[in-house]
Image: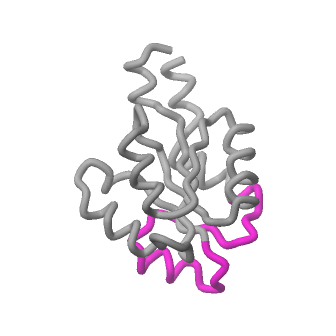
Amino acid sequence: MTDADNADCPRMVLIVDDDRDVREALAEVVLDSDLKPHAASNGREALELLRSLPARPCVILLDIMMPVMDGHAFRAAQLANDAIKDIPVSVLTAHADAQKTAHEFSADAWLTKPVPLRTLLDVIERFCPASCAEATG
């Protein structure tokens, strides 16, 4: 795969969650799915990481309740930044009404904690299709 192909199909997932165990578990699933996980423990770290990555992730898995910069503040900053506003976001929430929360965030998808593995894989595949890697690899 060339660098240009990698830019068109980065197969990266940004995981933003303050719970280290959740980040590590999600990163393991992402890695097992032949994707590249990147993780941040809060929204501020996620914004800094987005500025430094060589390519944009195909999806952001975003927790809501976090210290320093929560999911609401991150999403507002993301939507205000033309360079990253169109990166799809799936909110991660323990709230019973995850769909409503996703709507409030203008998110593209939602995942309810604890996240069922099949549901997580379906969301990742929706935004990071395997066909993209096969087409460029």
Whether residue 46 sits left or right of residue 32 in the image: it is left
**Which residue is painted at 72% across and 65% down in the image?**
115
Task: Report the magenta residues as a range.
Answer: 93-119
| Percent of width and height locating residue 102 | 49, 74
**Which residue is painted at 51% across and 48% down in the image?**
127
The answer to which quarter of the image holds residue 114 is: bottom right
> Does 52 appear above or below 107?
above
Q: What sort of colour scheme is used for the picture?
A: one colour
**Which residue is painted at 53% across and 39% down in the image?**
12
Which residue is the extreme one toward the top?
2
Whether residue 97 sits left or right of residue 87 in the image: it is right
> Does 112 appear above or below 136?
below
Which residue is the extreme one toward the front?
68
Numbered marks: total: 0
> Does 39 appear above or below 44?
above
The answer to which quarter of the image holds residue 16 is: bottom right
| Percent of width and height locating residue 73 | 39, 73
The answer to which quarter of the image holds residue 13 is: top right
The answer to whether residue 130 is magenta is no
Depth check: give the residue in front, 6 or 38: 38
| Percent of width and height locating residue 89 | 46, 60
Q: Split into 4 quadrants, where in the image is the C terminus?
A: top right
| Percent of width and height locating residue 34 | 67, 33
**Which residue is painted at 50% across and 83% down in the image?**
100
